Image (cartoon, helix red, strand yellow):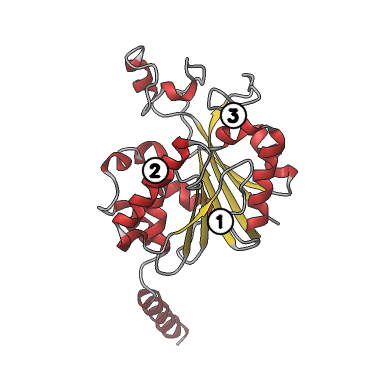
Amino acid sequence: MRQVLAAILALGMASIAHAAGPSSDDALKAAIASDHRTPAYVQRDAARHPYETLLFFGVQPAMTVVELSPGGGWYTEILAPYLRDRGHYVAAAYGEDSPKEYRRGYTANFKKKLSADPASYGKVHLTVFEPPNNLSYAQPGSADLVLTFRNLHNWLSYGDDNMKRVFQSVYDALKPGGVFGVVEHRLPESMPQDATASSGYMHESYVIKMAESVGFKLAAKSEINANPKDTADHPNGVWALPPTYRNKDKDRARYEAIGESDRMTLKFVKP
């Protein structure tokens, strides 16, 4: 009798799971595999590991997710359709009235991307994140997850105090228990990090210390985006590597063999 009841219960649970639709993992896989993605972006999946990275950060389809500095929308192409039906994707980008022309250009191109595909991006909420001054990109306590990918070195150019203000803004935007997910080019601790991270690389210890200084707890580290071939000592820094190849043909084969940069992947939690 107990076995029969167990079988009935298992069948019922399976029916409930089927009725609820695909799991979040399957939905994420579908978003990554979608043909709406830019082919050049897809080619970088092997270096950026979007599925493993987003699962590590704990993304779920009903979350409110804020992405700081989405750039050309590499992760937008995945997150916006993934969150469209049940969640909320906030793209915190440069302002249209930014004092810097290249930033205005980024935002104009990003908005064109969104408007060109309303089926994928029609529910994207675009806000302004432009450190060091404009950090009002989300209502306090509104986000389940804040993400940023290879941007911290840009913010450090404004100094430690302003970097701390950015981290504080993330802490304030998150709900209690919310997660701040960071991917950044990693500088070996044995190598000096200058005040502005001019090479594009940063010490993992610096990022952790900065996060903890505003109240975050380090929940986990991952080597998903590690690259042990990267020595982080290239002329022109991280931009010597693919896909930028800032040194052009000089040592290009060597940089191609290294691949994209070694990256820290850190998960912080707001208590």
Residue type, mark 3 in image? Met
Q: Quadrant of residue 12?
A: bottom left
The quadrant of the image that shows the N terminus is bottom left
Residue type, mark 1 in image? Leu
Residue under label 3: 202
Q: CA distance from mark 2 to mark 1?
A: 20 Å
Q: Is residue 89 above or below residue 113?
A: below
The x, y position of residue 125, in whole percent, is 47, 60
Label count reads 3
Q: Is residue 142 above or below residue 94?
A: below
The x, y position of residue 98, in whole percent, is 52, 42
| Callout 2 crowding tier (Cα within 10 Å): few <14, some 14–19, many ≥20 | some
Q: Secondary structure at mark 1?
A: strand
Label drawn at residue 145: 1
Asked whether residue 74 appears in the rendered view, the answer is no
Residue under label 2: 72
- Residue 9 shown left or right of residue 135 in the figure: left
| Callout 1 crowding tier (Cα within 10 Å): few <14, some 14–19, many ≥20 | many
- The answer to whether mark 1 and mark 3 are in CB contact below 8 A is no
Asked whether residue 104 appears in the rendered view, the answer is yes
Identify which residue is drawn at 40% across, 79% down.
Answer: 16
Q: Quadrant of residue 29?
A: bottom left
Seen from the viewer's position, the closer of residues 16 and 216 is: 216
